[in-house]
Amino acid sequence: MTFRIKRFLAKIPKLNDPVLIEGLPGIGNVGKVAVDFMIDKTGARKIMEITSHSFPHSVFVNEENIVELPVIEIFYKKRKGKNDLVFLAGDIQPMDEAGSYELTHHVLDIFNGMKGKEIITLGGIGLADIPENPSVYCTGNSKQMIQRFVKGEKIKKDLFGIVGPIVGVTGLLIGIGRERKMDGVCLLAETYGHPLYLGVKGSKEVLKILNKKLDLEIDISTINQEIHEIEEELSKKAKDINELMKPKKSSDKTNYIG
């Protein structure tokens, strides 16, 4: 699989025990909305863009009527006296299993080069109805990491039997990260399972947890003021992306797609 990288910095900066936070498109775009919001509010800087043959064979048309390839982006934010942050964001996830594995290894290689050891991935749990007060579930690659995030928070940790496999990069980063001795958790917020629904309420619940656990000092209430812009941006891409990435027919179980 071919990955092409466009670098925005000549050299990756030296980071202090960075934490990787992933939020790529998935059910309700819960993770994408949360990570895009954090990137904006922290003023994170772009390190690189990744394109690949495993991404959809299509382009987006932007507001200036110029075509853009779908990309996955990596950003960073240095913080004085705190863990630095690395964000994995983008328009899409790879469309095939091989691409998902190769991209995951590629991202972990980059993160390992930054001396990173901790990963947080974000996503949604698709429900049949719109949840009024979405619950957040937590799983991870060690009991210690799960307990660390669950402690003091209204987070559920009993996922077994509730959701199916966590597919895509969202799940693989945690699984392969374990093999690489990286600690990882995955936070999943309940949302409506309709392919064009934007799970903002679920994103806000995830952001509340990360705001506290990572000491982000973000005013989450402002997400309501900016959600129109987020919806406008995502709605232009959501229909086409959904057709390309449409999941297999679901069973009676609650489903999750990274």
Image (spheres, rainbow, N blue to C red):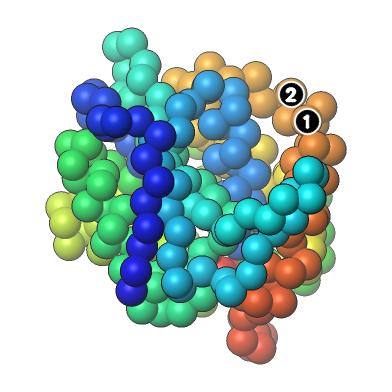
Q: Nearer the viewer, residue 208 or 97?
A: 97
Residue 115 x, y percent position in the rendering: 17, 37
Q: Residue at coordinates 79% horizontally, 56% vertically from top-left? A: 236
Quarter of the N terminus within the rendering? bottom left
Q: Which residue is mark 2?
A: 222
Secondary element at tag 1: helix
Secondary element at tag 2: helix
Within 10 angstroms of label 2, few (less than 14), some, or many (20 or more) residues?
few
Residue 232 x, y percent position in the rendering: 82, 45
Residue at mark 1 to residue at mark 2: CA–CA distance? 7 Å
Q: Nearer the viewer, residue 163 or 63?
A: 63
In this rendering, the answer to whether 237 lies above or below 202 is below
Q: Are marks 1 and 2 in contact (CB under 8 Å)?
A: yes
Q: Nearer the viewer, residue 9 or 90?
A: 9
Quarter where residue 102 is shown: bottom left
Q: Is residue 28 left or right of residue 154?
A: right
Circle number at residue 226: 1
Name the amino acid, label 2. Answer: Thr
In this rendering, the answer to whether 245 lies above or below 48 is below
Quarter where residue 142 is shown: bottom left
In this rendering, the answer to whether 192 lies above or below 202 is below
Name the amino acid, label 1. Answer: Glu
Q: Is residue 233 left or right of residue 216?
A: right
